[in-house]
Image: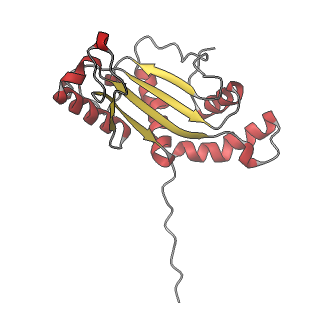
């Protein structure tokens, strides 16, 4: 009886890099006793606040579609939790959209972010190493979604910025910075 060949499943380049190179280096540097102690990226959250677009449903739908193209996954519309009269905001109004990426989609997005998107940012001199939150998570903002090669200028009604949060299992900012640097995040020196 002939053996069935197992087809290799898709493994993102960054996931392979993490397993083969980053884990041994982190064990050596920080002296972890177990492979499970090594910090890893657990999820990436991309958020687009719409501001005045909360009254324009077509704008919100277009931005949700562009975020879906960037992330490769359908975003959810975020609603306001409470009313703020100064912003003409009522409770339950649509204020933006967000998407949470995990596993292979997360690694694919991070790979595209670090190797293609960030270098396309105008006057880029490196990411700030001070944007860690004290618990090993890194937050960054982009001024416009046009730096992503998937987005065409004519297809979007308005240029919009976004926040990207990289959540890690690291206990300290130093461990998270070492992890992200080894994965290829271009931090400023």
Location of residue 108 in the rendering, given as x and y in whole percent from the top left corner: 46, 42
Pick the front one: 7 or 164: 164
The number of numbered discs placed on residues in the rendered structure image is 0
Q: Residue at x 19, y 22 (%)?
A: 55
At a point 35% along the width and 26% down the height, the residue shown is: 48
> In the figure, residue 90 lies in which quadrant?
top left
Q: Residue furthest bottom?
A: 1
Color scheme of the displayed model: secondary structure
What residue is shown at x 52% (from left), y 39% (from top)? Answer: 43
Relative to 14, residue 140 above or below: above
From the image, which quarter does the C terminus lie in?
Answer: top right
Which residue shows up at 63% across the image and 43% down it?
18
Q: Is residue 44 left or right of residue 60?
A: right
Where residue 33 sits: x, y (%)?
82, 45
Q: Is residue 61 left or right of residue 167?
A: left
Foreground: 168 or 186?
168
The location of residue 92, given as percent across then percent down, is: 29, 30
Nearer to the camera, 89 or 60? 89
Query: Within the image, what quadrant is residue 169 found in?
Result: top right
Where 155 sits versus 105, above or below? above
In this rendering, position of residue 136 left or right of residue 86:
right
> Residue 161: x and y, percent?
35, 20
């Amino acid at each position: 009886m002939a053996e069935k060949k197992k087809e290799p499943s898709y493994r993102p380049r960054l996931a392979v890099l993490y397993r083969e190179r980053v884990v041994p280096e982190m064990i050596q540097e920080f002296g972890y006793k177990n492979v499970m102690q090594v910090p890893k990226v657990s999820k990436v959250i991309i958020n687009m606040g719409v501001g005045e677009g909360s009254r324009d449903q077509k704008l919100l739908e277009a931005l949700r579609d562009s975020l879906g193209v960037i992330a490769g996954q359908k975003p959810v519309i975020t609603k306001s939790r409470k009313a703020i009269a100064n912003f003409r905001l009522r409770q339950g109004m649509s204020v933006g959209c967000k998407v949470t990426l995990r596993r292979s989609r997360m690694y694919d997005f991070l790979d595209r972010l670090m190797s293609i998107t960030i270098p396309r940012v105008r006057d880029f001199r490196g990411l700030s190493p001070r944007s860690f939150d004290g618990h090993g998570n890194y937050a960054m903002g982009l001024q416009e979604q046009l730096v992503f090669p998937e987005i065409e200028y004519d297809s979007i009604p308005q240029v919009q910025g976004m926040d990207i949060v990289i959540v890690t299992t690291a206990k300290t900012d130093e461990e998270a910075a070492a992890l992200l640097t080894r994965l290829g995040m271009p931090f400023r020196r």
